[in-house]
Image (spheres, helix red, strand yellow):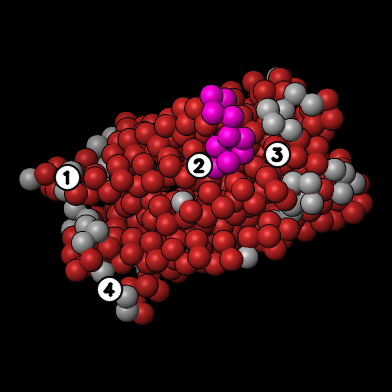
Amino acid sequence: MKYKSQYEMMTEKPIPGLIVKLGIPTMISMFVTTIYNMADSYFVGQINTSASGATSVVLGLMAILQAVGFMFGHGCGSLISRMLGKKDIDSAKRYSATAFYSALAIGIIALLLGTLMLTPLMYLLGSTPTILPYAKTYAFCILCAAPALVSSCVMNNILRYEGRAVFAMIGLTSGGIVNIFLDALFMVKMDMGILGAGMATAISQYLSWFILLAAFLFKKPQTSLAFKYARFDFKTLSDILTIGLPSLARQGLASISTMLLNNSAGVYGDAAIAAMGIAGRVSMFIFSAVLGIGQGFQPVAGFNFGAKKYKRVREGFFFTLAFGSILLSIASVAVFLNAGECIRIFRDDPEVITIGIPALRAQCIGLFFVPFQVCNNMMFQSIGYRFNATFLSSLRNGAYFIPVLLIFAWRFGLPGIQVSQALADVLTCLTCIPFTVSFFKKISKWDASGGETVT
């Protein structure tokens, strides 16, 4: 009866209320996650500019780990939501268990290899000699948390795609709140410097991991993490990986672009690296609003596509686009008008503020073009459209951003670096339009004929 009620909620409850119900917990999770990342930047920024730059460098490492976690999490989550829409619970359990143990194993491998190659890895990610000691200390703590960080992404997305966003929120927000308190304890009270920031992040990641695991052990969702359900055969893994590929592309390219951004900005000194990193974190905080509501749309899209209720997929897309656009517009305008104050919170350095203001304002303008691309990426990945989702996911942080960054940095110098992300956002949004139009024409025909879907 519990599972039947869950199915009816996902396929019959009015779309606006359903997406808000699922999106608000996810949005809160995103906000808290971003806040505790920003808390690290704030506390580390009190040390010096080189330490502040270290958090920007290690952000690339975290993006790599999250890329793997989201690949398995979104890949199995998309499959799970559609399997549950078809009432195929056994397959849902197989995908959830396989993705969890695969991600956990990769997290352990990352811990071992990363610590062995720590110095060259930091230089690869854009560290300068003055930043390196801080970056190595912070990165070592992040690598120690890699098994929890990667596998938590899987558990979080399984719960979210199953329609149990509140459980996922509790796991992520608990760790985030603890991280903020530990930052204050380790860095202010115990004067542990950047080591304290790294330890706070690692401890909070493991706390989140245990809380998310408890949701599976005691709340009894339809999916399972029991090892007996895991199947490491080619079909199961390829299903997860190919559908999760857009997340790997999105997050992996984010890591590469962060590395290139740090290297490009590093020509202008540690202050430039710190400024671009702070601008990116503030922009990500705004971005988390539309990302959160978009992730609330994902299980709705997957469930209803699996149940062949295509009108609800279309309705969910346009509601998410409108709601996300309103939230993001309000936040972007507020930050644009107070860009200097936002930068100063994290590093009260005149040079950092001078470089950070135009970068942050440019990103605020670019964010107006983000909701449309987010809705496209979320929808196509959730319904299993591998090519569309992977291609569109590769644009914002990769296929557009990387060449724009390199060309503009060469041609215009620091001002070119500051506006590169905004231009990439505009180009990505425009590219999404024909994909959206084509898809909605297709499902309109399915609505009329009751035809089968092909993914």
Mark with earlier residue (2, 1): 2
Q: Is residue 90 above or below residue 293?
A: below
Mark with earlier residue (1, 3): 3
User: Could you tell me residue 428's position as x and y percent?
Assistant: 65, 51
324 relative to 147 in the view: left or right: right
Q: Nearer the viewer, mark 4 or mark 2?
A: 2
Residue 51 is labelled as: 3
> What residue do we see at 74% from left, 54% from top?
126
* Mark 1: amino acid: Phe
What distance separates the C-alpha of mark 4 from that of mark 1?
Answer: 23 Å
Mark with earlier residue (4, 2): 2
* Mark 2: amino acid: Met
Asked if labels 1 and 2 touch by Cβ distance under 8 angstroms, the answer is no
Occupied quadrant, residue 455: bottom left
> What residue is pinned by disc 1?
218
User: Could you tell me residue 35's position as x and y percent?
Assistant: 53, 31
Mark with earlier residue (2, 3): 3
Q: Is residue 439 above or below residue 30?
A: below
> What residue is pinned by disc 2?
199
| Label 1 environment density (alpha carbons within 10 Å; few <14, some 14–19, many ≥20) | few
Occupied quadrant, residue 363: top right
Occupied quadrant, residue 425: top right
* Mark 4: amino acid: Arg
> What residue do we see at 27% from left, 73% from top?
231
Q: Is residue 91 above or below residue 276?
A: below
Residue 50 appears in the rendering: yes
Residue 110 is labelled as: none
Q: Relative to the observer, which residue lies in front, 183 or 69?
A: 183
> What residue do we see at 63% from left, 60% from top?
118
